[in-house]
Image (cartoon, rainbow, N blue to C red):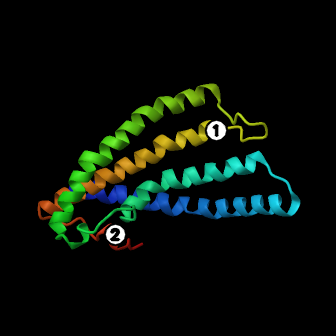
Amino acid sequence: MDLLKNIVLGIDRLNEWVGRSISWVAVLMVAVVTGDVIMRYLFGKSFVFMQELEWHLFGVLFLIGAGYTLLHDSHVRVDIFYQRLTERQQAWINLLGVLIFLLPGCFLVLDTSIPYTAASWAVGEGSPDPGGLPARYLLKAVIPLGFTLLTLQGLAMGLRSIMLLAGHSVGPERSKGLQS
């Protein structure tokens, strides 16, 4: 059980570090959007590269932050019943959700996005729009990276549930806040 606990805590630490690091992209995204709005409404100018950069930054933030969001149990869910269940019942739901929905979904996205990303890298894909960003393949590489981090956190969630059901504790529940 110590090995499983170390794996879970290692994945948690990885996604905590990645999530805190990637959070700075939100600040950059706000600056880019603000600059774009100022340029458009005060000066009547709009640049394709700024608009593309906005959605590229959003995509990076969303994809890379997904594992961090799962770590802190901050994904949207309808928990009318879940919140009233015992810890063991919640562990069963989490385990089944990971096994039936999360991991198969992640593997499907990984299976399709890796060749998609490789093809983009092979041709050095850029924006099809004049004045757009030149390295779209970098954004596409974020898809398998983000889903790898989400898959790892899903594995950690499943292992944590298994350990709880076996009567072992892994440490503080991530949804109650991570102590630095």
| Mark with earlier residue (2, 1) | 1
Give the residue pinned by disc 2.
Answer: 175
Picture disc at residue 136? 1
Q: Secondary structure at mark 1?
A: helix
Residue 89 image position (x, y, % from top left) = 16, 64
Q: Looking at the image, which is closer to me, 163 or 89?
A: 89
Location of the N terminus (image quadrant): bottom left
Q: Is residue 44 left or right of residue 161?
A: right
Picture disc at residue 156? none
* Residue type, mark 1 in image: Arg
* Residue type, mark 2 in image: Ser
Q: Residue furthest right?
A: 43
Label 1 CA crowd tier, 10 Å (few <14, some 14–19, many 20+) = some
Q: Quadrant of residue 124?
A: top right
Residue 87 image position (x, y, % from top left) = 18, 69
Residue 23 image position (x, y, % from top left) = 55, 62
On screen, residue 131 above or below 38: above
On screen, residue 173 above or below 35: below
Q: Secondary structure at mark 2?
A: helix
